[in-house]
Amino acid sequence: SSSSDERPASVRPVVLFVVQPGETNTVDQRLLEFRLWEDHGIGVVRLSLAEVYRRVRLDETDGRLLLGDDGEDDNENENDEMENMETTSERNVIQREITVVYFRAGYAPTDYPSGYDTSPDDDATGIEWLARERLERSRAAKCPSLGYHLAGCKKVQQELARPGVLERFFPNDDREETPVVPLLRSAFAGLYALGADADEGDLDAVRDVLFREGERRYVLKPQREGGGYNFYGKELANKLRQHCTVVDEDGDGKQNIVLGNALSEFILMERLFPPQQRAILLRNGIVEGSGMTISELGCFGTIVASAEGEVVHNEYAGFLLRTKFSGVDEGGVASGFATLSSPYLC
């Protein structure tokens, strides 16, 4: 995108936060919003994908995303400071170009409730997908980009775990004094496909669940985030039995399995069993209880790349530690299964 210095004075850059309707999880968003305004004088606007469809226009000549009004007041969505600086007449003259799109929604099927009809006519009903397409086709920077969004999907992670796939990204790794690929692969749990691409190794993991009482060793995961969507233990085994057909047994007694189409949206993952420790968990300042807990440490990184794929920034950016009682399967904080914690308490 052009820098703000190259824009005409009548164009004001803004950052779009794509959110769910009625968004309430905004505390961390506010920190970003305030820094953008205090350090750079750039305002934030929050819109759902449906609102993007109604209010954001793509200039097909240069790829600009332009924010328009739909007859409603923006005051509840944008910085108060920014709004106070603009009179009504100024807002009628100043164009607001969305230069960065920050996706806080768009990761779940429920974020696209209007369906998949994106036919190029006025009868198309899949307005959220049309809005997403409009954003992706623009010159605005996206966080995350479509590629990085897909890279966070369970299916892509499962494909990266297949033998020989990581080597594509490190073609000279076998010539290095300390090869990277074996170190990366040593940190992987087992990840198994359940779609048409399932190979014999994937099917053997399914057999482990169905015929060797291995349901505790795995978790069934859809392409979702946030907790509450996985299958564990008996529920996992029942889900597989519901959508698997045992055709026959070959000469060595191995069961031949046909996977149902409904399983293709899932992957089967080897379950992790981290060390336990006794802790007291608090939520909203109230003691939730005490007992044996397990924790999950996630490290953040920030990366900025050009449209051509040149990486201009790639840095560590902090961590998040979640702690939950050891008997709890799911792990989302916002969904109520885990609490935020600190390595200093471990």
Image (tube, rainbow, N blue to C red):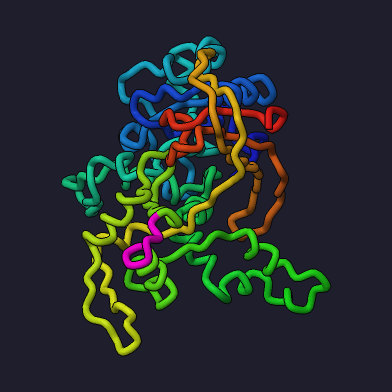
Q: Position of residue 288 (x, y in %)?
A: 48, 19
Residue 69 placement: quadrant:
top left
Q: Between residue 106 and residue 72, name the one nearer to us.
A: 106
Q: Residue at x 27, y 55 (%)?
A: 239
Residue in the picture at 68% in, 28% down: 345
Q: Is residue 31 above or below residue 81?
A: below
Query: Is residue 111 visible from the viewing direction of this image?
Result: yes
Q: Position of residue 55 (x, y in %)?
A: 35, 32
Q: Give the residue furthest to the bottom.
A: 251
The residue lying at 49 percent from left, 23 percent from top is 26
Position of 115 compared to 173: left or right?
left
**Front residue (pair 151, 190):** 190
Residue 54 percent across, percent down from the top left: 31, 34
The quarter of the picture where residue 275 lies is top right
Span highlighted in magenta in the image = 209-215
**Residue 290 picture location, percent across and down:** 53, 23
**Quadrant into which the C terminus falls:** top right
Q: Is residue 216 left or right of residue 130?
A: right
Q: Is residue 302 magenta?
A: no
Q: Is residue 150 above or below residue 278?
A: below
* Quadrant including the N terminus: top right
Relative placement, left or right, of 57 versus 326 is: left
Residue at 63% over, 73% down: 167
Q: Residue furthest right?
A: 177
Is 121 or 150 nearer to us in this picture? 150
**Residue farthest left in this picture:** 123
Identify whether 18 is placed above or below 141.
Answer: above
Out of 324 and 198, give the one closest to the viewer: 324
As drawn, 198 above or below 225: below
